[in-house]
Amino acid sequence: MELDRSPLARPFPELPHIDGVTLRVARAGYKTWERADLTFAELAEGTAVAGVFTKSACASSEVEMGREQIGQGRARALIVNAGNSNAFTGYRGREAVEQIVEQVAGALGCESEQVFVSSTGVIGVPLPKDKARSGVEAVLAAEPCGWEAAATAIGTTDTFTKGAHTSAMLGETRVELAGFIKGSGMIAPDMATMLGYIFTDAAVEPAFLQEMLSKANQASFSCITVDGDTSTSDTVLLFATGKAGNAPLAAWEDAGADAFYAALLQLCRELAQLVVRDGEGAQKFIEIAVTGAADDASARRIGLSIANSPLVKTAIAGGDANWGRVVMAVGKAGEPADRDRLSIGFGGTWAARDGQPLADYDEAPVAKHLEGQDIRIDVDLGIGDGRATVWTCDLTHGYISINADYRS
Amino acid sequence: MELDRSPLARPFPELPHIDGVTLRVARAGYKTWERADLTFAELAEGTAVAGVFTKSACASSEVEMGREQIGQGRARALIVNAGNSNAFTGYRGREAVEQIVEQVAGALGCESEQVFVSSTGVIGVPLPKDKARSGVEAVLAAEPCGWEAAATAIGTTDTFTKGAHTSAMLGETRVELAGFIKGSGMIAPDMATMLGYIFTDAAVEPAFLQEMLSKANQASFSCITVDGDTSTSDTVLLFATGKAGNAPLAAWEDAGADAFYAALLQLCRELAQLVVRDGEGAQKFIEIAVTGAADDASARRIGLSIANSPLVKTAIAGGDANWGRVVMAVGKAGEPADRDRLSIGFGGTWAARDGQPLADYDEAPVAKHLEGQDIRIDVDLGIGDGRATVWTCDLTHGYISINADYRS
């Protein structure tokens, strides 16, 4: 089945060179695709790494190994296989990942724990070792490629290639951050989305790099959902090569730490939103801003309850300002709420305040807003200072067609 | 929009007379429907009542009042309004319910706390007091009607009228149980489904009646889901008129208590399953049996995680034995699981055992099973003795059409 490009797609941007990162792609042939499906990022010695992984109890061997490896904080290589997630494949899946790690570590002359592997695609088929071996051989011998080629090679059901970049000034030193990501369905926050990779030339100590990524994740990848389904392979890795030459960041008090974190958070949010823009069947991008909740975590859970409600998502698909369904989703979230203080608005117009529909509610500007592609829902709980913003897409016939009408 | 009758519909059965229950319907005109939309059940003096209500934090005034009233344990009347849920309507909604209660209590000469009111339909429009007043007047004067007329009058988007009955022997005394229910969308367990009413002529002390209903609810209404969305009005009430003349049941040790509970549980399950059979857009009825979980509650949460997964539901709609999606849904449930002990089967055939696809897996019988209307998914966690069965339906284009293509 050939998927149409998402109407919410964004062009792939011009990404800056990140000193210490070399990208290559090759074709392992995991599927019948006539394109590269194996991506390799070679990282300079001393590169710091941080990662967040799916909390799934049925995670893939790749995720299991990544969780074990991330603690030592250094990375020399990243391998991404596309077309086969290698999840739920038992010891055979684990052996395939170990083979890749050994092969790459041998070629680079590095510790095997510094080689990170991700796989994405069908669940339940062991990654074929022979294809992996010849694919890794080919990618090690390949010419370096650009960001877009690497970002395209990690895709599966994605309808467009997703990347973003930003920069930050650490005192006098400018550092670059660039990343790419894939994901379209089976997207729900816990932690995140499918596979995302971020590279920076900044120098950051691994433990602090992990602290910043975990924090940024809470306000980006963990704030998106397409269908409430959580992948067995979700992974976001952040590599810092240190080639920019700044004084290494090790704590929030360090000069430049705030600037770097702000840039990282912006990049994480941009990448996360690109996944929502490629949500299966998506026709509309929805931002849900929750304020006045008991605390920030409560606000996020309420936001995700709304974002995961099929009745809210179908209402938006139909251009229906059905705030009653938003009330329902707030009510079912299991979080503190007071029906008689709850306010709900669309596109900047309040439809209901303090537990009642507004007497002078003018639906015209709301109807106009809902005709657009970028939808905003405001929910104020009126009971505290907690706030969060989450992002999702609408639920359309396209989602059903992609997931029911065709065999995967 | 005229909805087609669900392909999973069941005919309305012949229900027995329950001594002490008199049913009447009338037309209050809450919507433009040309049919009765107000249902009244008059209950004999001394009728015991038990109830379970939505846990929504944004529950309707009807639910709030029901929660307050249920503690005293006695009921003389039930009023159900269809076409307007009266939820999220502030003090005006509350006033409308209080008016109905006073009007009925005055006519029957009973305590107002013994009059229970439910409403179902659109959220955010205060129940019009004038229509309620004349509707109640009309229903008090109406001729008694049969079960099917009453069960039809409480429906909204339901495509068929739902009722069930059973009986039990309490020693030498035969007692009857009959019930009706409505619900199709916004169905998720917490506690249950929309509106359900069960009547019995058995004599049961209110506290014990409540204990049995709460327990049966955990294995019936709380084990179904259509779309994971929880209504603001969910209510199940159980009325026991005591007219059968058995020695009143007051504890599990009493003779007949087990028989009565078994009959009650069977009836609750039957009613709950009828709601799933009318799930919006449903083409297939799905039973998910979870075994080997850490405990029963964990098994139920895992079952509901599978039942609420749009990727699993669309796979079943497409006749796709996609057990990888079941693995995903187990993994995201947040419950104890061991990937390498997990087994998954469809219609009695195991597809994967102990964390791996079966080498000799024969998809033919599974494909045949998935062509049918009644689907069975077996999931064995392999880590404990916990078990639960949950029920849901598939997710089809019909659900999107009902909720997005037409304005509600």
Image: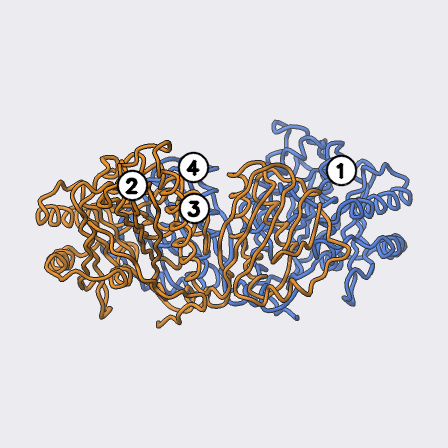
Chain colours: A blue, B orange
Q: Looking at the picture, do discs 2 and 3 lie on one chain?
A: yes
Residue B118 drawn at (x, y percent) = 25, 51
Please report whichever mark, 1 or 4, sits nearer to the chain's N-terminal start. Answer: 1
Badge 4, how many Cα within 10 Å: few under 14, some, many 20+?
Answer: some
Q: Residues within 10 Å of mark 3 (few under 14, many from 20)?
A: many
Q: Circle 2 — which element?
A: strand
Give the image location of residue A202, x and y in percent.
71, 39
Residue A184 visible within the image? no
Residue B4: image x %, image y %? Answer: 40, 72
| Pair 3/1: label in front | 3
On the same chain, marks 3 and 4? The answer is no
User: Looking at the image, how many numbered discs can be counted on the residues?
Assistant: 4
Q: Is residue A141 left or right of residue B318?
A: right
Rendering quarter of residue B346:
bottom right
Q: Which of the image's four quarters has the C terminus of chain A?
A: bottom right
Instruction: Determine which residue is flagged by label 4.
Output: A386
Secondary structure at badge 3 equals helix
Tell me the quarter of the image containing the N terminus of chain A.
bottom right
Give how far apart the Cα atoms at labels 3 and 1 are. Answer: 54 Å
Q: Nearer the viewer, mark 1 or mark 4?
A: 4
Q: Amino acid at mark 1?
A: Gly
* Pointer 2 residue: B50
Nearest the viewer among B80 and A276 is B80
* A168 left or right, relative to B225: right
Whether residue A331 is visible to the viewer of this picture, yes or no, is yes
